[in-house]
Amino acid sequence: MSTAREMGLVTCTACARVWPAGTPECGRCGHRLQSRHAGSLQMVWAFWLTGLLCYIPANIYPMLVTSTLVSTEANTIVGGAVEIARHGEIAIAAIVLIASVIIPVAKFIAIAYLAVSVQRGRVHGAHGKMHLYEIVEFIGRWSMIDVFVVAILSALVQLSVVASIHPGSAALTFALSVIFTMLSARSFDTRLIWDAHVPHGQTAAPLPPSPGTE
Amino acid sequence: MTAQTERTGAGKGLSGMDTAALIGCPNCDEVYVARTPPARRRAVCDRCGTVLISSRRNAGIPILALSVAVLVLVLAAAFHPFLSINAAGLGNRVSLLDVATSFRSGVLVLVSVATVMLIVALPALRVALLIYVIAPLEMGLRPARHARLAFRAAQELKPWSMTEVFSIGCAVALVKVSDLARLEFGSAFWMFVALSVIVVISDRFMCSWSIWQAIDAAEGDATASAREPG
């Protein structure tokens, strides 16, 4: 095991090119080179907190305001999902609940867990944490479903007095919450996990090997 | 294999070495001697499992073709209606341009702007950048001006182009108002479904390391061009 930092090198996180330590920017892709992203955790926490602050009003205020001839109804995220479930569309209600409640909450917990475990200095099970990070990065965008649904419906359902749908203020705060948590996850420098990794039996490999194939 | 023999031990500098033959794992910082894997295999980081090189021979043409397809579909889908509604004799059909202009009330304009950015503008920009970078390489020409910046931007945009999320959003919308009115998918919806599939396939073909190597090689940059070790 020999990391770029141990070898006096620095890896470009954008294009994987390796340069001597101290090189200010990647000569191939122009990305700024940092052996470890300085202030990575501060940025993670700053975006995390902003995302969380946006997520609270996103759940309190209505996401969708439906006006029909007889009534006007304002639905929050959870209220909207319950409404769908009441119409027997359990699968769709589940998609909405998973995308808008379970994924965002799980993401807040997962990012905080990763950041805290790195800050403690010793990481056990780095492989598991790396997988967790990859899942968080992959899944984050899917929370935008509900925002898109609101955008679609408020453009489409404009049938004068018969029925019309308008977005509630939660649409904006929820979209911001998703964007900020995506930024939070992207600010996390995964190399910190491996720096703090405590392997079972460390053996110093004398040569940099070629990567394995699968 | 000069990289291996010249190594003097962990902690010592390797300033005299040509680092072009090396590849670093962006996720865990492990350094390897870059070696193109055999056909249909991928070079994977032993330490953290990140795929480092997934080079497929002649991947440029499929990526180029798929990118052109995505660009055409995104632009066409923006103008065609993706859903139509019927209720009590009243009807409405909307395209994405209508979505962009639907939120007229205050700050919620931002929601429609963000929606159109994530679904049309950024995916279109991303594939346009890919075409701009890869087309000259495939034709054996010098890389386009600022090709490096363009390719890095295209990679940065990847998580922000959300066409596949939007396709699922259309399906949810259809169910959500099913008791209020009858909704039907328009042509643009099917374009988005096709788009989502093509984007996934295209990303499978794409190996960022190989494209960077191709840009280096095409510019004939002696210091940066990488030769196969061994």
Image (cartoon, coloured by chain):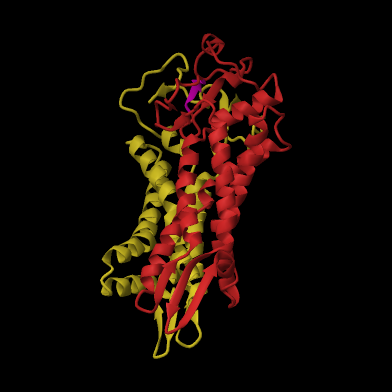
Horizontal side of B36 relative to B138 (left or right) equals left
Give the dominant element type of the magenta stretch: helix, strand or loop. Answer: strand
Chain with red colouring:
B
Q: For the image shown, how many numbered marks are present on the structure?
A: 0
| Residue at 61 percent of width and 20 percent of height | B226
Q: Is residue B179 visible?
A: yes
Q: Is residue A22 visible?
A: no
Chain with yellow colouring:
A
**Residue B87, percent across and down?**
42, 81
| Residue at 62 percent of width and 27 percent of height | B214
Query: In front: B153, or A184?
Result: B153
Name, please, the residue furthest toward the bottom. Answer: A70
Q: Which image quarter: residue B16?
A: top right
Query: In front: B139, or A170?
Result: B139
**Residue B100, percent across and down?**
59, 67
Name, please, the residue furthest toward the top. Answer: B5
| Residue at 31 percent of width and 66 percent of height | A93
Query: In front: A194, or A100?
Result: A100
Residue A103, magenta (yes or no): no
Magenta residues span B30-34
Whether residue B230 is situated above or below residue A3 in the rendered picture = above
**Residue A41, percent across and down?**
49, 47
| Residue at 53 percent of width and 52 percent of height | B160
Residue B32, magenta (yes or no): yes
